Structure formats: structure tokens, C-alpha cells
Image: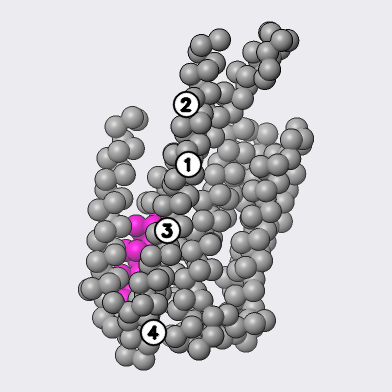
Amino acid sequence: MNGYLFAAYAAAWIIHIAYLATIVSRYSKVKREIEELKKR
Amino acid sequence: MKSTFPILGILTAVLLSYALYLALVWAPTEQTMGDVQRIFYYHVPSAWTAFTLFLINFVASIVYLIRRKPSADILALVCAEVGVVFCAIVLVTGPIWAKPVWGIWWAKGDIRLTSTLVLWLIYVSYLVLRRFSASGQTPVLAASMAVLGALCVPFVYFSIWFFRTQHPQPVMGGGGSIDPRMLHVLLINWLAFSCFAFLVCWSRYRLEKIQREVDQAHAMQSLNDPRSSR
């Protein structure tokens, strides 16, 4: 596969996956906050 | 509702894989540029998806300014955030295509390239405003900014018609022609990215809604218990 083509497709998916990872991490944070609220 | 999301997720993953296969294997190789032209199947659908999301952000912002509906505010925020991600992909894949084809990463002063970068910066500023401003007027300020920012979208889209630019002419409506197989691959990729964007917006919308409810619960708890740290 052409190097530039691979770089472009890989970059696109790295950006998408990085963004999805931030959503997952924010979900975990909000879940922890809900648990804390339930404990009080 | 709970089972709909995973089903749509699987269907979107299958569609994205099929679109990737079409782009890398099935689509014919362009005679002048060779395989590098296949970047177009990610670059153009990402741009169309970003523009669509910015337009939804525009409509939701107007609805929020008129009716002050929190759901419209959340939708505007979510579409701007996901739109910035797709626009970032456009700005990254464009130069990767330009280097082997034009011999340079970035054509300085080119109206399409510069206006796309400005558009991205406008929506990044919108997100920074939403993230760091604690004022109660933030949603109104952000909605006003989004309405003005959206004016940039048609400018970016039509800039290649009205100005001299190094950027290739539009795929559709630009007077040029495209191989029907290439058009088919382009449209399938656009459909796949649109479905993916819809799912990401959906999950981000749910997250934002839960986050606001949690923030409200924290605020209520602080009111009820003045010794509480939050």
C-alpha cells in the first residue's frame, strides 16, 4: 500500500479512536460521580 | 432503546468495513495520481459530514436562542464537537494527499485550505468557550457564536467556485466528470461516516445529558448540606 495512503487512513482512524476514548473516559468519570452521589 | 444502539453499532461497523474495502480494493485506480487518489474517499466524506454537523449545530443554536430548550443546546454542543473531529480529519488527510500530488503539504494563501482552517478554529473556539466559561450566559453566547460561525460553512464550500484555488474542483456540480464506480465508493463512504457520526453524536448526547443531571444533583446536595465540599 502507498505510504501516503496508509498515513491518511491511519491518521483518520487514530483521530476517531482518540475521540471515542475521551467519550469512554468521560462516561467512566460520570459513572463514578453517580456512585459517589448514591453513597451520600 | 437499549438494544437499538448495539445493533446500529454493529451495522455501522459492517458498513465502515465494506466502505473501506471499496475504497482500497474495489475502486479503480486513478491514472494520474495512482493510489494516493484513494485518500479522497476519506477526505471528501469527512468534509461533507463535518459541514452537515455544523449546519445541525446552526439550526439547534437558533432553536435554543428562540425557545431556550436545553435539548437544543446539548444537540448544538454535540454536533460542534463531532464536527470538529471530522474537520480535523479533513485538515490532516488534505496535506497528506497534497504532498505527493502538488509537491507541497500546504498551499499558502489558498482560499479553500485557509477558510477550512479558519472554520475549524471557529468551532474549536466555540468548544473552548463552552468548556471554560462558567457564566450562566455561556449557552447564549455560544449559540450566537455558532450562528455567526455557520456563515463560514457556505463560504468554505463555494470558495472553489468563486476564487482561484489550487484545490480540485467539486465532485458534483463543478462541471467535471467522475467515474461512476468512484462516485459509488464516495457515496458509500459518506453514508458510512454519516452513520458513524450519528452514533457518536447519540452517545455523546446521552453523556452530556447525564453529566448535566449529575451536576444538578451536586448543586442540590450542596444547597441541602452547606458543609458539603461540592
Q: CA distance from mark 3 to mark 1?
A: 14 Å
Helix, strand or loop status at disc 1: helix
Q: What residue does disc 3 label?
A: A14
Q: CA distance from mark 3 to mark 4?
A: 32 Å
Q: Tell me, yes or no, if residue B75 can be seen here.
A: yes
Q: Is residue B215 magenta?
A: no
Q: Earlier in the sequence, mark 2 or mark 1?
A: 1
Q: Earlier in the sequence, mark 3 or mark 2?
A: 3
Residue A23 — which label? 1
Q: Nearer the viewer, residue B157 or B218?
A: B218
The residue shown at (27%, 48%) is B11
Q: Tell me, yes or no, if residue B209 can be seen here.
A: no
Q: Nearer the viewer, mark 4 or mark 1?
A: 1
Res A2 quadrant in image = bottom left
Query: In this rendering, is residue B9 above or below A15?
Result: above
The residue shown at (48%, 83%) is B99
Q: Is residue B140 left or right of residue A28?
A: right
Q: What residue does disc 2 label?
A: A31
Disc 1: which chain? A
Disc 2: which chain? A
Q: CA distance from mark 3 to mark 2?
A: 26 Å
Q: Amino acid at mark 2?
A: Lys
Q: Is residue B47 left or right of residue B164?
A: left
Q: Position of residue A26 (x, y in %)?
A: 50, 36
Q: Nearer the viewer, residue A27 or B166?
A: A27
Boundaries of the magenta span: B181-194
Q: Is residue A38 left or right of residue B215?
A: left
Task: Tell me whether circle 3 and circle 4 mark residues in contact (CB < 8 Å).
Answer: no
